[in-house]
Amino acid sequence: MRIVGLTGGISAGKSTVSNLFKFHGVPVVDADVVARDVLKKGTGGQKRVVHAFGEDILLPNGEVDRAKLGHIVFSDPGKCQLLNRLLAPYISSGIFYEVLKLWLKGNKVIVLDVPLLFEAKMDRWTEPTVVVWVDPETQLQRLMARDSSNEEDARNRINAQMSLDQKRSRADIVIDNTGSLEDLEENLRMVLVQVTRPLTWTEFWLSRQGALISLFAIVIGVVVGKKISKASLERNLI
């Protein structure tokens, strides 16, 4: 099985690339979706976050006010790191469960969409890693337009993350998204050729099909070994 790491920065277009992968039939595990689930009312993740940040972050219905929590953590790098530490175990477990479900279905290539792929050191489990990149000014303008935010708030959110240039330097594949949607789709088609290439032998043995073949070979080996041992023992007793 091949797990492709996908990351980027806020307003770089990672979600668009993720959706394009799904459109082309490549399954995606979205860490943001997992993160939303671990913050739902009554979950262990929510309880830890409320304990750390106070009940002021809750809505009247008991759910976390994500906009308020986001404003708190994106304006303070220390609080952002705290939130990441609190939720990391829950998000990691959720991601593992989603990958396992796709593995059991026999998927050979899975895209792991994680905003903090490098920060959380999850890139050690992915190959190749794909970074969606735009230049800083384009990122800023797109974020301000998307959220109708002022420049200060937008810069705070961008600066709370590893820079796209840093991520680009660590990537195996870079998708430049400074152009149009048509340009992005063309870039993705070239990336698809790379990430869906035939599995290496190591990747094959990690797939469900490879695991089943290995299990079958082990069972046959045990059966044949028992028969050989029995025949050898009988010969020695004659």
Image (cartoon, grey):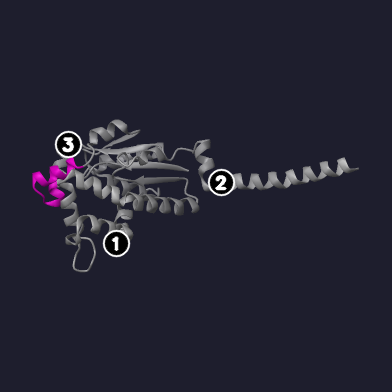
The vertical placement of 8 against 65, above or below, is above
| Badge 2 or badge 3: first in the primary sequence | 3
Q: Which region shows up in magenta? A: 144-160
The alpha-carbon separation of the residues under discs 1 and 3 comes to 33 Å
| Residue type for callout 3 | Pro
| Residue 142 magenta-highlighted | no
Horizontally, residue 210 falls left or right of residue 222, namely left
Observer-side mark, 2 or 3, equals: 2
- Identify the disc placed on residue 136: 3
Residue at the disc numbered 2: 211
Q: Is disc 1 in contact with disc 3, using a CB cutoff of under 8 Å? A: no
Of marks 2 and 1, which one's residue comes earlier in the chain?
1
First of labels 1, 3 by sequence position: 1
- Tell me the residue at 16%/50% (across/down): 146
Residue 182 location, quadrant:
top left
Question: In the visual, does 103 lie left or right of 212?
Answer: left
Q: Residues within 10 Å of mark 1 (few under 14, many from 20)?
A: some
Horizontal and vertical percent position of residue 181:
24, 44
Q: Secondary structure at mark 2?
A: helix
Image quadrant where residue 173 sits: top left
Coordinates of residue 2 in the picture (x, y in percent): 45, 41
* Residue occupied by mark 1: 40
Quarter location, residue 156: top left
Q: How many marks?
A: 3
